[in-house]
Amino acid sequence: MLRRHALMGLAGAALAFGFCGSALAEDTVKIGLILPMTGPSASTGREIEAAVKLYMQQNGDKVAGKKIEVITRDDTGQADITKRLAQELVVNDKVAVIAGFGLTPLALAAGPIATQAKVPAVIMAAGTSMIVDQSPFFVRTSFTLPQNTTPMAEWAAKNGIKKVVTLVSDYGPGIDAEKAFKDKFTADGGQVLDSLRAPLRNPEFAPFLQKAKDLKPDALFLFVPSGFGASLMKQVSERQFKEAGIQVIGTGDVLDDEQLNGMGDVVLGMITSMNYSAAHDSPENKKYVADFEKANPNMRPNFMSVGGYDGIGLIYKALEKTGGDTTGTKLLDAMKGLSWTSPRGPISIDPDTRDIVQNVYIRKAEKKDGQIYNIEFATIPNVKDPLHGKK
Ligand code: VNL
């Protein structure tokens, strides 16, 4: 008897708690942020998490009468963990949106969960063109490699470079960069002598760099993901490309602001193309960099950080538009076509592809106030991913 009462009491408490829980859930919008906070891409996780926190500091944690709660989870950069975390966040935590995804394979792992649960998935970091085609619930606030690479190929062809060797990390975004560079550069009359691919994990660049140097190109084009640029540039420096009269160019992933200042003189004068530089000259960016560096001493915001900052911004703006309605399809529709001024410049979400449209800048690595920055000197406005519709 006693035991039965005790059990009933427990059940009653559980019911009451459950009721409270769901009433609370209606006032709170949960966002699952899945990032590599440890492992080889931890800097990407740190930058994005810091930027999301900054946005919430600046804009508050209430939108359309709802409280925003971000739940951050570390996938350590492994796709099976990303998938499990996405599932747990959707099923157990009932998040309205999942977001983050530090690398292409991690974003791809979350796609089926977003599709099945009809939950928008905001890609804040990954850059392989085809990702957004893999789920109708994907929306991207980062960039694509073809978007950032094509202007570099155009600049090279216009600036006396005739023969290039490309060297990229051997996975989705690297292969996109290789193809985008070759397509545009050869269309503009240039020649790609060889397309080299180094393994993504624990890359040993030396044999590839030696091969590239032996081919005597006018320029070496590089892509490695965020966090790998410093070790690549150290080996580039040891091979003495500058001294051999070979110009080194690349996407801005290589000269990532997070590591750039420690790379040394080898990078000075190097030309890259990218969607963001911490030195971008606008009032929005000056405030962004100052606030970011104040909240995170010894950290400089990089292109990953703005993917996170604008990603959470996109979720806020969509919630404002739906009046706080978190139905997945409604949030997704609200995201399509949104446009605003980011620290990187004007951006919008293409309503047809759910991919970001943004300026791409050509930059030169230079010393400014004793620190190394990528100084923008040319702007290619409103660039869409050039591979879309051409696959
Ligand atoms: C990817 C592309 C990752 C560009 C990156 O850094 C990057 C990706 C982590 O799609 O995996 O700089």
Image (cartoon, grey):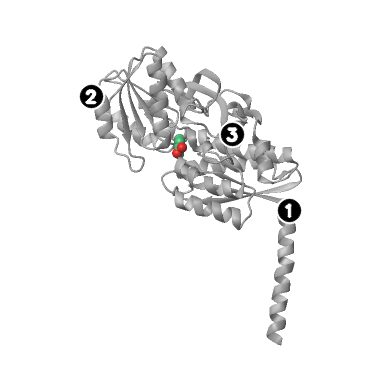
Specify few, some or many for label 2: CA neighbours under 10 Å numbering under 14, 14-19, or 20 or more: few
Point out the tag, 1 or 3, that comes first from the N-terminus: 1
Looking at the rendered image, the disc whose residue lies closer to the viewer, 2 or 3, is 3
Q: Residue at 73% across / 57% down in the picture?
A: 24
Q: Nearer the viewer, mark 1 or mark 2?
A: 1
Q: Position of residue 299 (x, y in %)?
A: 51, 38
**Camera-side residue: 161 or 130?**
130
Residue 198: which numbered mark, if any?
A: none
Which amino acid type is marked by label 3?
Arg
Q: Position of residue 313 (x, y in %)?
A: 64, 37
Using the numbered discs, state the Cα–Cα distance from disc 1 to disc 3 in whole angstroms: 27 Å
The answer to whether residue 289 is seen in the rendering is yes
Q: Which residue is mark 3?
A: 354
Secondary structure found at label 3: loop
Residue occupying the far bottom of the picture:
1
Identify the mark nearer the N-term, 2 or 3: 2
Quadrant containing ligand 1: top left
Name the N-terminal-most of marks 1 and 2: 1
In the rendering, which numbered label is found on residue 26? 1
Residue on which disc 2 sits:
214
Q: Amino acid at mark 1?
A: Glu
- The amino acid beneath tag 2 is Asp
Quarter occupied by residue 172: top left
Marks 1 & 3, CB-CB < 8 Å contact: no
Mark 1 secondary-structure assignment? helix
